Amino acid sequence: MMKGSRTAAVLLAVAAVVLALAFYYPLLSFLTGFSSRGGNGERGGNPLALLLDPYYRRIILFTAWQAALSAALSLALGLPGAYFLSHYDFPGKRIVSALTTVPFLFPPILVVLGFTLFFGSNGWLNARLMSFFSLSSPPLSVLYSITGIVLAHAFYNFPVVVRTVSTAWERIPRTEAEAAKTLGAGPFAVFRTVTLPALAVPILSSVLLVFLFCSLSFSVVLVLGGGPKATTTEVELYRSARIELDMGTARALASVEAVLNFVALALYYLVQRKSASVRQGAVNASRPKARLPGTWKGRTALSLYALVCLLAVVGPIASVAAFSFLSRSGSFGGLHASFIWYERIFSIGGFNSFSREALPALLTTSLIGVAAATLAVGLGGFFAASRSERGRGPLALFLYLPLGTSTIALSLALEAAYPRLAGSVAAVVLLHAVIAFPFAYASLRGIFGRIPPALYEAARMLGAGPWTAHRTVGIPLARRGAVAAWAFCFALSAGELNVVLALGIPGLKTVPLVIYRMVASYNYFAASALGMILAALSCVLFLFSDIKLKGDSDVL
Amino acid sequence: MSCEVRGLSKTYPGFRLSLDFSVETGEFVSLVGPSGCGKTTALRIIAGLEAADSGMVSIDGRDVSLLPPEKRGVGFIFQDHSLFPHLNVERNVGYGLDIRGVPKLEREERVAALLESMHLAGYEKREPWGLSGGEGQRVALARALAVRPDLVLFDEPLSALDPALRRSMSAAIREARRKIGFTTLYVTHDQGEALSLSDRIIVLRSGGIEQIGSPEEIYGNPRNPFVADFFGGGNSIPGRIIGTAGGSATVETSLGRFKAGTPFPGRSEGKSGTFFFRAEDSTVVSGAERTGMNLIRGRIADIEFEGYRSRISVDCGSGFGVSAYVPATEKPAIGENILVGVPLDAGIVFIDD
């Protein structure tokens, strides 16, 4: 009796068709080779032959190796954070916890820029170390090697571990540890017998997610990697398709990559399912937490950890911020504070190419972001609302598939399937929407899932039809969450470089693309200024809605 | 505004609901039974929230079996009040009127009047999360009554409340009925609630009706040991029926012969049967009071002090025990040999199936 109406089914079908046409059809036909007829310069293209070639085998192994190292380092950096966040109510905790969403929305190209400015040979850290120890050459050489890639990935992804694990840690009923203590368990035994079993699933799922993100990471490896020695399948895929124009190899690489990533995604999905069935405990809300660790040891540990995070996270971001306000007099002159880059961005019709590019790029990026976010939230909403009353079936894996799909491969696939579309901005909007869709779906699903079915029933009993019940109860309750999801998708689109670079649409310049070109030509100051505006646009919007949402979620 | 349920059935694996009953206009009927007996399913089918496999539900002579919930004109009170968290009290109560397009002015008037009569005046702008459990449930009742439903269905509305609130909420329901006069079907697993609120009680057990009757009938004249046990409980002593002369029955048990004074239908000599009596009807007797009583000999095994009385558990040997009450002024001791007396008109004899 409570089944959705026919209109709901039609809308759901429309959403499914859009997803099928924009994602499944192009990708599958690209990977299986259906859309390769008359392709440009096809050579080989056999995934198995690729696996036998030592050159490609090394790239594939390197991809997995750097992703594994990055995941391990993220875990090491993330666990203490998860502990502190779940056990103490220190000042500024809310902001810190909101900041853990940063990796999902901070543009990767800015991470690259920040790392170059902070850890690079001429970067802030090396400069300080040189002057402090009176060295003649920079002591740290982390960039353009696996170290640089792993550090950047860990910095970028450890908040994923913090977020996932701290949420689970917070939900372990404190009485469980107390029961263990009364039965004679010491602190280590409590950790081993109570805490660790409860955290195993969240730890595993966050590590898998980080692994997936790192094996699909593009900008970081493209810029911070070091040529053939430190490159990944994703970058090699881009190189084959766009520089060597060898679509056969590109497709073979994409196939191998797709299989590996699908395995990782499927594992992640299975672990997630398990976590959903294991524990649905409420937060230990009734008992207040301490503001800070009670012992000096605990406080020292917290301070040390905060310092490491400050260095790893705030260092690169602060470098970008600082560089955006600096300028150099002449080619080799000294640095001085300056607003010149911001002035140039907002000066209309200047002679400088930067002035001519920046503002239109900001506008283009914003428009694409608005369109893509709206589409993603719309699609996600249809799926989430219609599935809210049912359990999560294996079908959900297919909805999450874009999360584990190479954006470069997806771009190439769309181009092969719809050559005319691929030359327009619409292709970017569509692909950004597809990439953002899993995030929109997951967050809206969570929101709709928290609305008790009895509320819909109450509305029905008071005379509301199925649609009126949705309009007057479901949608108002999901609205705030949907706004946050929208802001998130906007940030994702605004910071996205891969699709724009891979499609290479003539005349289309987005902010990440302009920044990428400036970084490539060592124009760090202007890149920083533009990056700051992009980051401000994305983060402020999202952090605001995230904090608003947190306060709001008490309603449900 | 009567409600009629005919041949209603719904089958789940290992469970079959099968119901026939009616609720008269203005009547308060309770569906009572242990968890899993199908009472909530029955209520949800009548509301239209779930579909029956077969059967008919009619409200006020109108077959509503195929109508969606919003077209049935039925009010529903949920266990956890289910107030809309994004609407304040006034808008929650006015929700149904709003859906029906009642003009704002009239809506506000009706909501205010209703809140007034539910002792909720001044709560208009309060948000649901700021309400206590009892207040929330009263708002939920006001919300359901605002659209003047023909029939109000209650799904264990008091079970989430603590005992003190339960009492005041059930008083609120009685008061609202006196003032507004609605027809009620009320689901509960709490026998006390059913006895104190209902005009009639329908006792359910694994999907079927065990007995329908007034609270007095259900309590005083249960049809079988299940109903007797569910409403009040007591002592059951198995045996064999040896006589049904003169409107009474005699049962031979391992604890002796017992006679029940209540009218006994049919001739059932030789069948196995059960002698049942409530602990509160029995007393500890001394020699002088023995006449006109069934007597059970035993030793006190346990004593529970309950304030104005004490409940004693009596070990009668051969594996049987019964319980009885004594006034708190008496001070029995564990191990003491006593006689438990059950007046003839307090015993009930059930024929076993």
Image (cartoon, grey):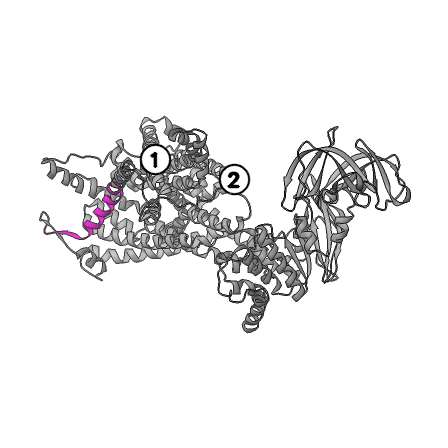
Label 2 to label 1: alpha-carbon separation:
28 Å
Judging from the image, what secondary structure is the residue with disc 2 in?
A: loop
2 vs 1, front mark: 1
Magenta stretch, main secondary structure class: helix
Say which quarter of the image contains residue B71: bottom right
Question: How many residues crowd around disc 1 within 10 Å: few (fewer than 14), some, or many (20 or more)?
Answer: many
Closer-to-camera residue (A134/B338): B338
| Coordinates of residue A377 in the picture (x, y in percent) | 44, 53
Q: On the image, which quarter does residue A151 sit in? A: top left
| Residue depicted at x 80% and y 41% | B288
Quadrant of residue A154 within the rendered picture: top left
In the picture of the structure, the residue carrying the numbered disc 2 is: A394
Residue type at mark 1: give it. Answer: Leu
Would you place residue B58 above or below residue A27 in this image? below
Q: Is residue B237 visible?
A: yes
**How far from the left and from the top, in percent, is residue A105?**
34, 48
Say which element carries label 1. helix
Question: Horizontal and vertical percent for residue B27?
Answer: 72, 60
Is B64 rendered above or below residue B332?
Answer: below
What residue lies at 18% left-to-right and 59% top-to-bottom?
A351
Q: Which residues lie in the magenta part?
A: A310-330
Q: Which mark is residue A75?
A: 1
Residue B13 visible in rendering: no
Q: Nearer the viewer, residue B106 or A429?
A: B106
Query: Residue A250 bears which disc, if any?
Result: none
Inspect the image, locate mark 2, and give the three-letter code of the amino acid beneath it.
Pro
| Label 2 and label 1 in one chain | yes
Side of B328 relative to A144 (left or right): right
Residue A313 left/right relative to A195:
left
Q: Going by the image, does B112 lie left or right of B13?
A: left
Circles 2 and 1: CB distance less than 8 Å?
Answer: no
